[in-house]
Amino acid sequence: MVDFGLFAGAIQLATIINEIARAAQANKVSCMAMNHRIQTANEIIKVAFEQHKVNPKSLVISESAFKTYFQLLERMRDFVAEISKRKTFSKLFYALRFRDEFDALLRDFDSCVLDLNLGIALRTQSQLEKDRSALEEDMTELRTFRKELQSGIDCLGGQLMGIRQMIATNRPMDDILALVEIDYKQITDITPGETRHGRTFPVHKKAWLAQEVAEKPLGFFGSQDMLDMLKNEIAILKKLDRCNYITKFMGITNRNNNISIIMEWLPGGDLATALASVSY
């Protein structure tokens, strides 16, 4: 007979899975479909154990069958935890494995539940279709993101010739060069302010032309050659901001040769986080 400590552990695992699924930031539909199956089974197990307290002969579960169930819950917990926070870019490469693991886990779950001998039936055809529908909803979302991403890549590809020309000559096109330098007086403080500390330089939240921007101070540039080189590099980055999925670089400010880069302020904190939220 199964000891109650192992049963309590299964209830705790189901609670953790429920919390993860409800807080999921990605693949939420699939997470909730798997969560629903687990909660249903655990409720039946809970009732069975309550009946066992009254009548010990009412429940006969082998120790090995329940250990297998417990181990399966651990696998499902880890799976839901992983896909609930997986960023959109990594989901592109994870899609097939995600689908296969989803199907395999639910098949194992059905088999395991039968072994528990609690009278819980396998998924009906209707339930199978619901599980597949949940999976397909998340996969459709992924395909939509892939299409949008491809649009951004195509846009970038269309700019490559001009970018190569700028890099080869180390001189940006005149229309870009004219817009690189921003009057530092136009960059103003914003309330509430915010400063983020990156690997090299801090980034400050500011305002420019009625929009939120990020100011990244680079320090003192003592020679005109250094300034020209910096302008050229930033101009190339500015050319790229016409494409989707690229952080926008507005230009530079020069306050007595103290240079700052002015670029897009990302509310999410970094480019990876911003990209991950595009598909939702």
Image (cartoon, grey):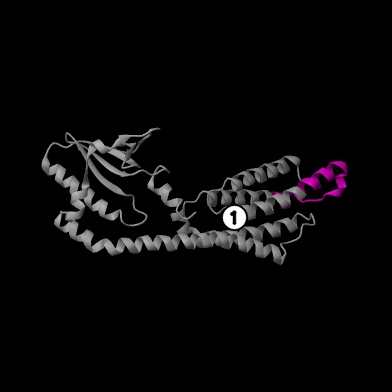
Disc 1: which residue: 29
Residue 172 seen in the figure: no
- Please state the horizontal and vertical placement of residue 8, each as a whole percent of the image: 71, 41
Please tell me which residue is depicted at 71% across the width and 43% down the height of the picture.
6
Give left or right: position of 273 versus 62.
left
In the rendered image, the residue lying farthest to the bottom is 125
- Please state the horizontal and vertical placement of residue 177, each as a whole percent of the image: 18, 51
Please tell me which residue is depicted at 87% across the width and 47% down the height of the picture.
57
Relative depth, front residue between 1 and 156: 156
Relative depth, front residue between 69 and 142: 142
Highlighted magenta segment, given as a residue range = 45-67
Q: Main secondary structure of the magenta part?
A: helix
Residue 46 seen in the figure: yes
Relative depth, front residue between 8 and 271: 271
Depicted 156 relative to depicted 55: above or below = below
Q: Around disc 1, counting alpha carbons within 10 Å, would you say few (fewer than 14), some (14 to 19), or many (20 or more)? A: many
Depicted 107 relative to depicted 79: above or below = below
Inspect the magenta stretch and tell me whether residue 57 lies in it: yes
- Please state the horizontal and vertical placement of residue 187, each as a whole percent of the image: 28, 37
Image quadrant where residue 147 sits:
bottom left
Please tell me which residue is depicted at 34% across the width and 53% down the height of the picture.
246
- Please state the horizontal and vertical placement of residue 170, each as a whole percent of the image: 15, 54
Please tell me which residue is depicted at 41% across the width and 43% down the height of the picture.
267
Give left or right: position of 221 versus 160.
left
The amino acid type, in three-letter code, at marker 1 is Val
Image quadrant where residue 109 sits:
bottom right
Inspect the magenta stretch and tell me whether residue 221 lies in it: no
Give left or right: position of 93 versus 116.
left
Where disc 1 sits, the SS reads: helix
